[in-house]
Image: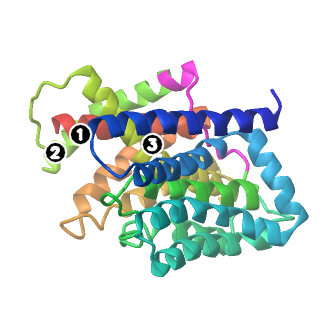
Amino acid sequence: MTLRKQVAVLIGGSVACTAIAEAIVLAEVHLNPWRVAALLESFALVLMGFVALAHSGFVRQLRHWAVRSATMAFAMPLILLIPYLVLALATQTFSWLAVVKLFLYIAIPTLLLMPDRLHGREAASWRDFAAMAALAVPVPSGWFNGIWIWPQDMYVFRPLFCVCVGAYGFLVIRNLQDVGYRLWFRKRDLVDAAANYVAFAIIGIPLGLALRFIHPHLQHVSPWNFALSLMGVYLTVAIPEELLFRGILQTFLGKTLRTTHPQRDALIVASVIFGLSHLHHAPVPNWRYAIMATVAGLFYGNTFNTRRRVSASALTHSLVDTTWHFWF
């Protein structure tokens, strides 16, 4: 199937699923159908970008256009403003401040990475780390508060939007290889993800108890509820964090560090940075969370090193977080 046909199938499938979802929602609740349609179409548009950027052929086509024109390279990610405009205008929640925030979130990392658009170096520079910070720091700082707010704060838009911006910047503009941004699994991904999950549990549970970070509580959880929670964590937490810390940061460090064992050292450094990124959780500074996240990051990173696929490390991540949610 050609890229054009694949894109057409993606768009057609998204529209069809959105129409079905709208019919289901309207059958259960009494909301303005046009606003519901705008919400679902807006979500479908963001989800399309989230999925399409995991397709190597789609990325190559965007890369081709980006190399031909710097203006095109800068303008293409601004298409991500359209989903917000669809929802905000239809629900009368439009805000120029929201538009400026979204524009800056797209523009800053894109401009930082533009100098390496044509002749990208494998080793990371200060611009690469600055772009990573520009993607990561706004998320816990509340930058996205008050943007997608109908019918309430729609958190799900934030991680999907961030992944689209980050994937575009580093896969298309920066042309970083071996990021492994994939959303689907291979059989070996499942095996390695599960093995690292079990290995972390053997170390992490005693460590968490010793640090008084976790508190076991037995409860019955149906397989359906566990699967739904796992899927939600996978899409909104694990994929965004694994793309940034493993797919981008760990990959860059592995290409940049001039040590005897660069991949091992990249794994360790990325895990420590991943742990430190959790210090902002209450009570601040949450050093217990930072320690646990650092240790967990070693196992997430090991899954990534083995499979070179974000989907694999994200599955380990999701299993850990979902287990913690229900039983600790």
Residue under numbered circle 3: 235
Image location (x, y in percent) of residue 110:
67, 70
Residue under numbered circle 2: 214
Q: Is residue 186 magenta?
A: yes
Residue 36 lies left or right of residue 130; in this view the side is: left
Residue under numbered circle 1: 324
Mark 2 Cα-neighbour bin, 10 Å: few <14, some 14–19, many ≥20: some
Q: Is residue 259 visible?
A: no
Residue 288 lies left or right of residue 96; in this view the side is: left
Q: Is residue 59 magenta?
A: no
Of residue 252 and residue 320, the one placed in the foreground of this image is 320
SS assignment for the magenta stretch, majority: loop
Q: Secondary structure at mark 3?
A: helix
Q: Is residue 167 visible?
A: yes
User: Could you tell me how far apart the alpha carbons at marks 1 and 2 are, in whole angstroms?
Assistant: 8 Å
Mark 3 Cα-neighbour bin, 10 Å: few <14, some 14–19, many ≥20: many
- Residue visible at 73% across and 39% down in the picture: 7
- Residue visible at 37% across and 57% down in the picture: 275
Give the magenta range: 177-190
- Of the numbered discs 1 and 3, the one sitting upstream in the chain is 3
Quarter of the image for the N terminus: give it. Answer: top right
Image location (x, y in percent) of residue 126:
65, 74
Q: Secondary structure at mark 1?
A: helix
Pointers 1 and 3 in contact (CB under 8 A)? no
Of residue 69 and residue 302, the one placed in the foreground of this image is 69
- Of the numbered discs 1 and 2, the one sitting upstream in the chain is 2
Image location (x, y in percent) of residue 122:
76, 58
